[in-house]
Amino acid sequence: MESKRFTTVDEYVAAHSGAAKTAIVAMRKLVTQNAPGADEVISYNMPALKFNGILLYYAAHTNHLGFYPFTTAIRQYATELEKYDTSKGTVKFPFGKSLPSALIKKMVKFRMQENLEKEMARKAKRITKKSAPKSSSKASPQKRKATKKT
């Protein structure tokens, strides 16, 4: 496949054929069904799901479908992933074999919860920051004017 810049997941799927396309379509269905409210995007020229930030990526390679659910999900499900080739942030699912639907579903749900918690923490931090009294060592312009008049 030639190097092409994709703008939609549909374009990405259409650019593939055979086992790669079958795996992409199966992964797309699995992840989108299990991530309600998430948006499909292309990021780093790969299909990705976005829900309060990127949830995961997936991409077709020569002999496998790469699944990139971030390091935390891989650590969380390390025991169940032992039969697959993994690295810090990657799981390789070989073409021609069924995707482990139950495991992928759990990983997607885990990532959604993780991103939701991060977003809630960011919002709480913003609220705390806004409600905190501002402290300044400098006098306000009004106070400076009043001081100069005397």
Image (cartoon, grey):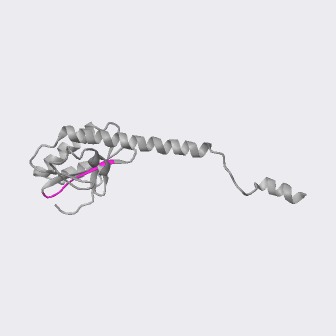
Q: How many badges with numbers are in the image?
A: 0
The residues colored magenta run: 55-62
Taking the view exactly as shown, the residue that stands out farthest to the right is 150
Residue 62 horizontal/vertical position (percent): 14, 58
Q: Is residue 14 visible?
A: yes
Establish if 1 lies above or below 22. below
Residue 30 horizontal/vertical position (percent): 22, 40
Residue 44 horizontal/vertical position (percent): 30, 58
On the rendered image, what quadrant is the C terminus found in?
A: bottom right
Residue 60, located in which quarter of the rendered image? bottom left
Q: Is residue 38 visible?
A: no
Residue at screen point 21% across, 45% down = 79
45 or 103, which lies in front?
Answer: 103
On the rendered image, what quadrant is the N terminus found in?
A: bottom left
25 or 89, which lies in front?
Answer: 89
Q: Does residue 8 appear to the left or right of 17 in the view shown? A: right
Majority secondary structure in the magenta region:
strand
Residue at screen point 61% across, 42% down = 131
Q: Does residue 20 appear to the left or right of 78 in the view shown? A: left
102 or 55, which lies in front?
Answer: 102
Taking the view exactly as shown, the residue that stands out farthest to the bottom is 3
Residue 63, located in which quarter of the rendered image? bottom left
Residue at screen point 34% across, 41% down = 112
Is residue 26 in the magenta section? no
Residue at screen point 40% across, 44% down = 52
Residue 115 horizontal/vertical position (percent): 38, 44
